[in-house]
């Protein structure tokens, strides 16, 4: 009999799932780390737990205290759920442009939600910078104190993946892994997994799948932080080298437009039964690029970040997709055309 003492112990140890279509198309074994199976339904549960545990261990977070964070959604959900389990309250600052589904989940988890206009990081009212000031303000009046989780520059985030995600992938592949690739939001997953795998085998290639509108592809390819274009993806895309990204061992950078990445989301749902968010589509596209560059016969792992239901109002909305000049899969188009008349039964 296997029992978890609390939801905390249910975080991590997610399975690898073979992605059949892309594996067969490339001649490689491409696996997705099923991070959507964490309790908060995303990879960010790992960072949330690590950040909170490190804050408790250091004495910065006292019993009954408040955790403040700026997030596109998933880290905030993880913080709220872990906080509930450990007796902490959470205050989450989120750009108002994020999906309603994520905002609803944050409120459902009991977080106090502060919505702010989307603004670049250089703006003092950017959601991340504003959350730091808010944490300082709350700490002055809150009896049990408050901390700023600061997922982007708090390396407890990266450490979660050095300690857990990377070793899990190594063990699950019996060390027979040739490449790992994923997109970047805070940088914790890419850097942490990359460091853990390189420690075990320096020849494992680490790739970044960067969406349009982000600056890291150009940084790792050309040494310059330069963004171009835009993307509908949420929670990924970075314009600076965060503390978590410092010394990240990136070997293979790829720039992935939405028109390339988003169709994988639809294919995975229709053909493989995996309902995933847009960042997973970018990741799978990156894994395919890596596989084609490395050649057949290699084993590549990427991250299946979160459930697609968290983006349903946009990602699976034909009108929204068309407004962004993105392809609408035939099955989704057909669904939007179906109407079943209701007939009263006497």
Image (spheres, rainbow, N blue to C red):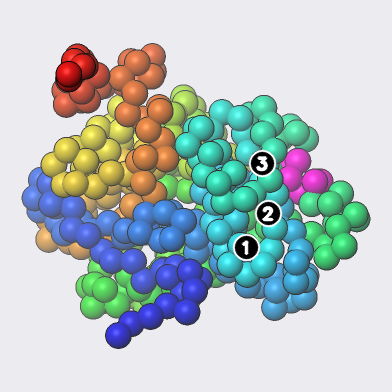
Q: Are marks 3 and 1 in contact (CB under 8 Å)?
A: no
Q: Could you say where residue 62 lies in the image, as x and y percent from the top left?
A: 77, 71
| Quarter holding residue 49 | bottom right
Residue 83's disc is 1
Separation of marks 3 and 1 at Cα, in angstroms:
15 Å
Above or below 342: residue 147: below
Asked whether residue 210 appears in the rendered view, the answer is: yes
Image quadrant where residue 259 sits: top left
Secondary-structure class at tag 1:
helix
Q: Residue at x 32, y 29 (%)?
A: 316
Q: State the residue at coordinates (25%, 68%).
A: 177
User: Which residue is denoted by mark 2 in the rendering?
Assistant: 90
Q: Is residue 51 visible?
A: no
Q: Which mark is residue 95?
A: none
Q: Earlier in the sequence, mark 1 or mark 2?
A: 1
Vertical arrangement, residue 8 with respect to residue 290, above or below: below
Residue at 20% across, 23% down: 335
What is the number of callouts on the image? Answer: 3
Query: Which residue in the protein does label 3 denote?
Result: 113
Name the outermost residue toward the right.
Answer: 140
Q: Is residue 17 magenta?
A: no
For the residues marked 3 and 2, what is the alpha-carbon distance in whole angstroms? 9 Å
């Amino acid at each position: 009999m296997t029992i978890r003492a609390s939801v905390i112990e249910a975080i991590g140890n997610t399975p690898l799932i073979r992605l059949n279509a892309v594996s067969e198309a490339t001649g490689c074994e491409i696996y997705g780390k099923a991070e959507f199976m964490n309790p908060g339904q995303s990879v960010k549960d790992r960072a949330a737990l690590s950040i909170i545990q490190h804050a408790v261990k250091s004495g910065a977070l006292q019993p009954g205290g408040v955790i403040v964070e700026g997030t596109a959604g998933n880290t905030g959900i993880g913080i709220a759920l872990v906080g509930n389990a450990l007796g902490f309250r959470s205050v989450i600052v989120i750009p108002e442009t994020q999906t309603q589904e994520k905002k609803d989940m944050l409120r459902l988890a009991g977080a106090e939600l502060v919505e702010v206009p989307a603004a670049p990081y250089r703006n003092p009212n950017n959601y991340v910078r504003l959350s730091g000031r808010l944490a300082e303000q709350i700490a002055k009046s809150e009896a049990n104190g408050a901390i700023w989780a600061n997922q982007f520059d708090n390396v407890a985030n990266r450490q979660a993946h050095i300690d857990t995600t990377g070793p899990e992938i190594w063990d699950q592949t019996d060390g027979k892994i040739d490449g790992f690739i994923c997109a970047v939001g805070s940088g914790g997953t890419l850097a942490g997994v990359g460091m853990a795998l390189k420690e075990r085998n320096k020849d494992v290639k680490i790739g970044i799948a960067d969406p349009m509108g982000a600056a890291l592809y150009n940084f790792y390819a050309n040494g310059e932080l330069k963004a171009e274009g835009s993307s509908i993806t949420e929670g990924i895309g970075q314009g600076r080298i965060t503390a978590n990204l410092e010394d990240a061992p990136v070997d293979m950078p790829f720039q992935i437009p939405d028109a390339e990445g988003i169709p994988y989301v639809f294919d995975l749902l229709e053909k493989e039964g995996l309902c995933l968010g847009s960042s997973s589509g970018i990741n799978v596209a990156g894994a395919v690029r890596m596989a084609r560059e490395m050649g057949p016969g290699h084993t590549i792992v990427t991250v299946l970040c979160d459930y697609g239901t968290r983006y349903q109002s946009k990602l699976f909305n034909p009108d929204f997709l068309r407004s962004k000049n993105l392809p609408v899969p035939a099955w989704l188009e057909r669904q939007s055309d179906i109407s079943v008349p209701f007939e009263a039964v006497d």
